[in-house]
Image (cartoon, grey):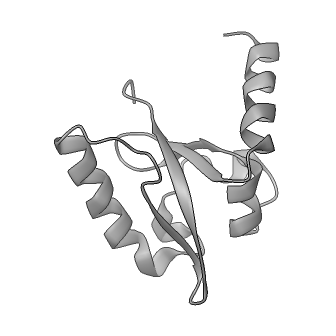
């Protein structure tokens, strides 16, 4: 995939109103759309790469998120609207997780 294609894909993901992210098999972030960055108050995509949920604003829910991801992987369940993204005790949005099977 060339740089222009990557840029085009990122623009499409950023245009969505959903929280969209993708992770490796260890649940470390490989990328995300701008809504994840906004929710975490992280300025650049590069600053989220390699982090896991325990290092982000929803750290208190990271164990539940990891367990859900492991179950979904083990049983090859889909990742549509995987989980609520608890951005604060009163603000919850659904998040989409894209899995990179090569990582």
* Picture residue at 79% right of the left edge, 51% below the top: 44
Left/right placement of residue 70 relative to residue 6 reads left
* Picture residue at 25% right of the left edge, 52% below the top: 70
In the displayed image of the protein, which residue is found farthest to the top?
2
Q: Position of residue 51 (x, y in %)?
A: 54, 55
Left/right placement of residue 14 relative to residue 68 reads right
Left/right placement of residue 47 relative to residue 44 reads left
Q: How many marks?
A: 0
- Say which quadrant the C terminus sits in: top left
* Picture residue at 40% right of the left edge, 44% below the top: 79
Against 3, residue 7 (above or below) is below
When asked about the image quadrant of residue 7, the answer is top right
* Picture residue at 61% right of the left edge, 48% below the top: 20
- Say which quadrant the N terminus sits in: top right
Left/right placement of residue 11 relative to residue 79 reads right
Q: Nearer the viewer, residue 77 or 6?
A: 77
In the displayed image of the protein, which residue is found farthest to the left?
75
Q: Position of residue 63 (x, y in %)?
A: 33, 71
């Amino acid at each position: 995939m060339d740089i222009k294609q990557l840029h085009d894909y990122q623009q499409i993901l950023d245009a969505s109103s959903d929280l969209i992210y993708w992770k490796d098999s260890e649940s470390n972030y490989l990328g995300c759309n701008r809504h994840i960055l906004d929710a975490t108050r992280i300025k650049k995509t590069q600053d989220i790469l390699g982090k896991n949920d325990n290092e982000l604003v929803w750290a208190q829910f990271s164990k539940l998120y990891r367990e859900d991801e492991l179950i979904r992987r083990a049983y090859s369940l889909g990742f549509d609207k995987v989980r609520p993204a608890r951005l604060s005790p009163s603000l919850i949005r659904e998040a989409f997780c894209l899995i990179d099977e090569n990582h």
